[in-house]
């Protein structure tokens, strides 16, 4: 989160250090002996729609098996909401503690008014992220400033957890730290990181003898990484390392290591020119500082997620979270050759457009059993229930179901392996079985296609179902 909306057109940077070859790093704050072999990830976040027309400042959760494609839980509604302070949260962080239970900390801020000072953070305890107990606000300092984007890590040399956060120390924006054993009583604050310029949104990545601190440099709007062999306040360098390029405003870095191999992802949260969009970079060796940008075809963020936190979990924990909170009853559908575009309706026309946009529900669909054949599928609008995508004169539009056999046939499609990529999906028309749903000039229609059609046409007819 930030009060400064700088336009970033330069380089995004991250720290590099160490010998050649992969370095296995533990997830930030994870204990030496975790609950069992990891088999997935959990993400915590709050939501703001692209133009902030529909926001929710509670704790939202999503799960993933690969760390890149996410299933929002509880219909993308919050699983817990603060009951004190401002009554809302931003910037949640999930820490797996040494006893394999969790602590959740978050900024006490309900909305986008960043001008008010607040000395407190929200804290919850959780055994398994299926319930949350012990809610409290913990006072971190007595300064007339904010307490933004708290995160926590285990400092084995102290036998305590460090809670770091953004605050203004009277001179500039720095990172402060308080130490605790129970997230109830905290030590006096200390300056943890002050590189001599304003910084925001600290995140830690620990292990392998080197500790990494990633952050936003407010003077130029870029993401950086610093490093230290210890976790002592003042021990991290300022970080001047190149990682990748992004257009727009970026903040809130997250660094996540694959639980089963030497692969890292660097996430950044965009606020300009559009709000609520993540960028992701990949590295095969975090020490070499070689980050390459992923395309939207390679990841799918939870709907309208902002300033997230990602932690590894076991396969059992992931299954239990899905059982407790449930997967969405709606889907979003991504274009293969325009992976930042989603199938949507606009003025009742079916088309693909780049997300984010409002109303965001224009791109949410309930995939019903086919109206003409239950083995097929019909696409019902979430925000206009009872209206379906159907073809008329081969053009796709949104229309109310009139109950006729003609409508049912026009609104029914059969899922096939993707014409451009068998790992994706194509949809064949029920009543015109040689024709497939595709986009042309970003408008949806059905056209005669086959595996021998031009590659560009087959790509137009290939999609991915997600959330």
Image (tube, helix red, strand yellow):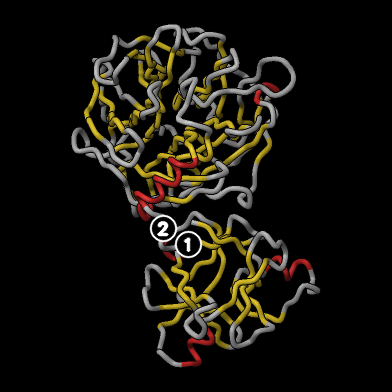
How many marks overall?
A: 2
Q: Residues within 10 Å of mark 2 (few under 14, many from 20)?
A: some
Depth check, front residue: 343 or 209: 209
Q: Residues within 10 Å of mark 1 (few under 14, many from 20)?
A: some
Q: In the figure, 302 relative to 159: above or below? A: below
Residue at image position (41%, 39%) is 44
Quadrant of the image occupied by residue 43:
top left
Tag 1 residue: 331
Quadrant of the image occupied by residue 82:
top left
Depth check, front residue: 164 or 229: 229
Query: Residue 81: x and y, percent?
Result: 26, 41
For the residues labelled 2 and 1, say whether their Cβ atoms are less than 8 Å apart: yes
Residue at image position (27%, 30%) is 122
Secondary structure beneath dot 1 equals: loop
Work out which quarter of the rendered image holds the N terminus and state it. top left
Secondary structure beneath dot 2 equals: loop
Tag 2 residue: 328
Label of residue 190 in the image: none
Q: In the figure, 51 relative to 453: above or below? A: above
Query: Residue 291: x and y, percent?
Result: 67, 32
């Amino acid at each position: 989160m930030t009060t400064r909306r700088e336009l970033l057109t330069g380089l995004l940077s991250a720290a590099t250090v160490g010998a050649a070859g992969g370095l296995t790093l533990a997830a930030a704050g994870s204990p030496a002996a975790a609950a069992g072999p990891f088999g997935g990830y959990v993400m915590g976040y709050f939501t703001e729609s692209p133009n902030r027309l529909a926001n929710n400042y509670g704790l939202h959760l999503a799960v993933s098996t690969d760390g890149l494609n996410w299933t929002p839980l509880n219909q993308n509604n919050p699983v817990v909401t603060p009951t004190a302070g401002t009554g809302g949260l931003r910037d949640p962080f999930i820490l797996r503690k040494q006893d394999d239970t969790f602590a959740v900390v978050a900024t006490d801020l309900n909305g986008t008014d960043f001008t008010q000072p607040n000395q407190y953070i929200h804290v919850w305890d959780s055994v398994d992220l299926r319930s949350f107990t012990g809610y409290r606000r913990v006072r971190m300092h007595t300064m007339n400033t904010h307490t933004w984007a708290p995160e926590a890590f285990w400092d084995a040399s102290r036998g305590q957890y460090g809670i770091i956060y953004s605050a203004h120390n009277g001179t500039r924006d720095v990172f402060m730290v308080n130490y605790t054993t129970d997230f109830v009583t905290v030590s006096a604050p200390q300056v943890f990181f002050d590189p001599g310029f304003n910084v925001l949104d600290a995140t830690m990545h620990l292990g392998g003898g080197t500790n990494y601190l990633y952050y936003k440099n407010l003077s130029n709007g870029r993401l950086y990484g610093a490093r230290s062999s210890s976790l002592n306040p003042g021990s991290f360098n300022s970080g001047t390392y190149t990682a990748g390029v992004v257009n727009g405003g970026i903040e809130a870095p997250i660094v996540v290591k694959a639980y089963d191999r030497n692969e890292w992802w660097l996430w950044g949260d965009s606020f300009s020119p559009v709000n609520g969009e993540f960028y992701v970079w990949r590295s095969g060796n975090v020490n070499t500082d070689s980050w390459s940008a992923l395309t939207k075809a390679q990841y799918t963020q939870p709907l309208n997620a902002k300033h997230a936190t990602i932690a590894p979990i076991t396969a059992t924990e992931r299954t239990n979270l899905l059982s407790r909170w449930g997967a969405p009853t709606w889907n979003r559908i991504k274009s293969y050759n325009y992976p930042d575009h989603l199938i949507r309706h606009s003025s009742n026309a079916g088309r693909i457009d780049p997300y984010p946009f409002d109303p965001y529900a224009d791109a949410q669909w309930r995939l019903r059993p086919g109206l003409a054949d239950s083995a097929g599928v019909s696409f019902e609008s979430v925000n206009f229930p009872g209206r379906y995508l159907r073809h008329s004169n081969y053009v796709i539009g949104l229309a109310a179901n009139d109950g006729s056999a003609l409508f049912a046939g026009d609104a029914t499609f059969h899922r096939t392996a993707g014409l451009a990529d068998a790992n994706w999906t194509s949809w064949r028309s029920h009543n015109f079985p040689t024709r497939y749903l595709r986009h042309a000039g970003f408008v949806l229609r059905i056209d005669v296609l086959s595996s021998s059609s031009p590659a560009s046409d087959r790509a137009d007819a290939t999609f991915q179902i997600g959330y």
